[in-house]
Image (cartoon, rainbow, N blue to C red):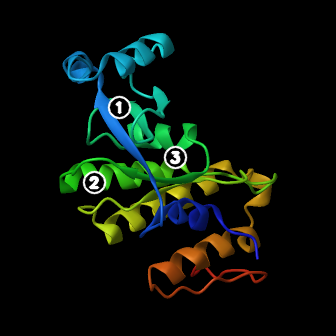
């Protein structure tokens, strides 16, 4: 069975992994102060690569503990984390440091939204980057929001001529199943609108 966009997006968040590459996020305004605390070799590497912690900027570090440095707009900006999920190659990542509940939820939601891959008419991306759930994230709230946004994005991306009841019912059923709702989907019969 083909994975849906919703399943792929929420599968980007994992409970644990044997190994995960740490992602250290930096706000551009904090970069200079952070950089002064780093060794000369790392400062030279960052200068050579042009990394200045601009939002969406990513660099891989191999010296010492391998890790990713990533520029973000703010710790609680989900779109910064979405951009990371779009840019990073497949693999397992974890956010370095502790995040408060708001930032942890934003990171998880953003990551899931960044893994959105509308592949109805083409092959899906081979491997999506996966993020270990941040500890303070509300998993139920993040999952519900990611599923809702992904379902709406699918419905927006599907051409109108493919949006008949038979086409809409699988996403609706998937949504109903995951939210424990009960729905009746009528396909192939006219609907009585009560004399309208």
Q: Residues within 10 Å of mark 2 (few under 14, many from 20)?
A: many
Q: List the residue tagged with mark 1.
A: 72
The Cα–Cα distance between marks 3 and 2, rounded to whole angstroms, is 15 Å
Camera-side residue of 164 and 34:
34
User: Left or right: 84 with respect to 194?
Assistant: left
Say what secondary structure mark 3 lies in: helix
Report the quarter where the C terminus lies: bottom right
Q: Check if mark 2's residue and mark 1's residue have beta carbons within 8 Å.
A: no
Sequence order check, earlier mark of 2 and 1: 1
Q: Residues within 10 Å of mark 3 (few under 14, many from 20)?
A: many
Sequence order check, earlier mark of 3 and 1: 1
Sequence order check, earlier mark of 3 and 2: 2
Q: Check if mark 3's residue and mark 2's residue have beta carbons within 8 Å.
A: no
Vertical relation: 182 (above or below) 4: below
From this viewpoint, is residue 196 visible? no
Q: Residues within 10 Å of mark 1 (few under 14, many from 20)?
A: many
The Cα–Cα distance between marks 2 and 1, rounded to whole angstroms, is 14 Å
Residue 82 horizontal/vertical position (percent): 46, 43
Camera-side residue of 33 and 62:
62
Q: List the residue tagged with mark 3.
A: 114
Residue name at image x 38 percent, y 55 percent: 108
User: Left or right: 7 with respect to 111?
Assistant: right
Camera-side residue of 16 and 164:
16
Q: Check if mark 3's residue and mark 1's residue have beta carbons within 8 Å.
A: no
Q: List the residue tagged with mark 2.
A: 104
Which dot, 3 or 1, sits closer to the camera? 1
Indicate the quadrant where residue 1 lies: bottom right
Say what secondary structure mark 1 lies in: strand
Residue 80 horizontal/vertical position (percent): 39, 36
Indicate the quadrant where residue 134 lies: bottom left
């Amino acid at each position: 069975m083909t994975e849906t966009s919703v399943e792929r997006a929420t599968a980007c968040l994992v409970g644990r992994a044997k190994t995960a590459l740490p992602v250290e996020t930096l706000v551009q305004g904090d970069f200079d102060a952070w950089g002064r605390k780093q060794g000369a070799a790392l400062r030279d590497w960052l200068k050579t690569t042009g990394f200045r912690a601009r939002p969406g900027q990513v660099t891989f570090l191999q010296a010492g503990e391998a890790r990713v440095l990533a520029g973000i707009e703010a710790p609680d900006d989900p779109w910064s984390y979405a951009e990371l999920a779009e840019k990073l190659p497949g693999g397992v990542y974890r956010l370095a440091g502790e995040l408060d509940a708001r930032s942890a939820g934003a990171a998880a939601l953003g990551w899931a939204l960044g893994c959105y891959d509308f592949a109805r008419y083409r092959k899906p991306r081979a491997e999506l980057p996966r993020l270990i759930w941040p500890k303070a994230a509300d998993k139920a709230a993040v999952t519900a929001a990611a599923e809702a946004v992904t379902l709406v994005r699918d419905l927006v991306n599907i051409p109108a001529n493919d949006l008949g009841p038979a086409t809409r019912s699988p996403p609706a059923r998937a949504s109903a199943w995951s939210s424990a709702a009960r729905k009746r989907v009528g396909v192939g019969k006219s609907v009585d609108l009560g004399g309208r």
